[in-house]
Image (cartoon, rainbow, N blue to C red):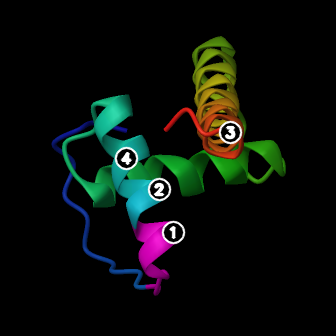
């Protein structure tokens, strides 16, 4: 899909403050132009995982990249939690 393709449908959902900060942080890390772009990519990624959309090698690399980012975020959270427990914060 072209980056400049017009989009006319709107999807809205609510997040807790903690969820919003996680999404915002991931968006900045990924370098997306907006939270909307990040959310759209995440939804389309989920669709590709469920087989609702045919993918290609590029999609597989995007999937791998997203999963590695999720793992990195989780590991960072665990590192912070461990540091806090050990009093190194």
Q: Which residue is mark 1?
A: 19
Q: Which residue is mark 2?
A: 22
Q: CA distance from mark 1 to mark 2?
A: 5 Å
In magenta stretch: residue 18: yes
Q: CA distance from mark 4 to mark 2?
A: 5 Å
Q: Which residue is mark 3?
A: 74
- Label 3 near label 1: C-beta < 8 Å? no
In this rendering, the answer to whether 39 lies above or below 56 is below
Q: Secondary structure at mark 1?
A: helix
- Label 2 near label 1: C-beta < 8 Å? yes
In this rendering, the answer to whether 11 lies above or below 7 is below
Q: Is residue 82 left or right of residue 17?
A: right
The mark total stands at 4
| Residue 25 numbered tag | 4
Which class describes the residues within 10 Å of circle 3: few (<14), some (14-19), or many (20+)?
A: few
The residue most toward the front is: 87
């Amino acid at each position: 899909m072209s980056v400049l393709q017009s989009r006319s449908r709107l999807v809205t959902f609510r997040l807790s403050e903690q969820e919003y900060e996680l999404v915002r942080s991931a968006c900045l890390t990924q370098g997306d132009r907006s939270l909307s772009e990040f959310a759209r990519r995440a939804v389309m990624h989920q669709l590709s995982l469920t087989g609702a959309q045919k993918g290609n090698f590029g999609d597989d690399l995007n999937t791998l990249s997203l999963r590695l980012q999720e793992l990195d975020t989780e590991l960072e959270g665990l590192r912070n939690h461990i540091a806090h427990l050990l009093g190194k914060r």
